[in-house]
Amino acid sequence: MSNNNITCEIIKRLDMFEIFENIFGYEYKKKKSSKYGRLYNTPFGYVWVRYDYKTGIYFYTNLDDGLDNGTLIDWIQNHIINTKNLGLVKKYVTENIIN
């Protein structure tokens, strides 16, 4: 899939559990998680990730910083590429997550 074919909706629906564990390598805190979401220990603090069954979108909340929350797009912009640029998010996703 090329950068031009991937949409924001596709990115928001990518499995953040899988991405956090297997691509980013964050520690999954199984005992502190539930059927409603998963807790991860990341370099940026403890992060709660949940899946919204109504919309099919994954969301995160940084428990150490209440202003840091959103979708996978926000996570990549805030913690991976460190800039608000959807073109770079799409490029990152196609090169590193969907390859």
Image (tube, rainbow, N blue to C red):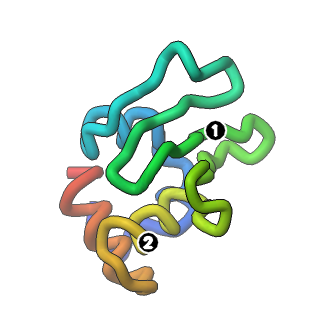
Specify whether 46 is left or right of 69. left
Q: Position of residue 13 (x, y in %)?
A: 55, 49
Q: Position of residue 28 (x, y in %)?
A: 41, 27
Specify whether 76 is left or right of 23. right
Q: Position of residue 80 (x, y in %)?
A: 31, 66
Task: Report the mark closest to the observer, 2 or 1.
Answer: 2
User: How packed is label 2: few (under 14 Cα within 10 Å), some, or many (20 or more)?
Assistant: some
User: How packed is label 1: few (under 14 Cα within 10 Å), some, or many (20 or more)?
Assistant: many
Q: Quadrant of residue 52?
A: top right
* Residue identified by numbered label 2: 78
Q: Quadrant of the N terminus?
A: bottom left
Q: Does residue 26 sit above or below 84 in this rendering? A: above
Q: Does residue 19 sit above or below 34 in this rendering? A: below
* Residue identified by numbered label 1: 50
SS at badge 1:
strand
Say the numbered circle drawn on residue 82. none
Q: Does residue 30 sit above or below 94 in this rendering? A: above
Q: Residue at x 39, y 34 (%)?
A: 18
Which comes sooner in the sequence, label 2 or label 1? 1
User: Which residue appears farthest toward the front when viewing the image?
Assistant: 64
Could you tell me the amino acid type at mark 1?
A: Arg
Could you tell me the amino acid type at mark 2?
A: Asn
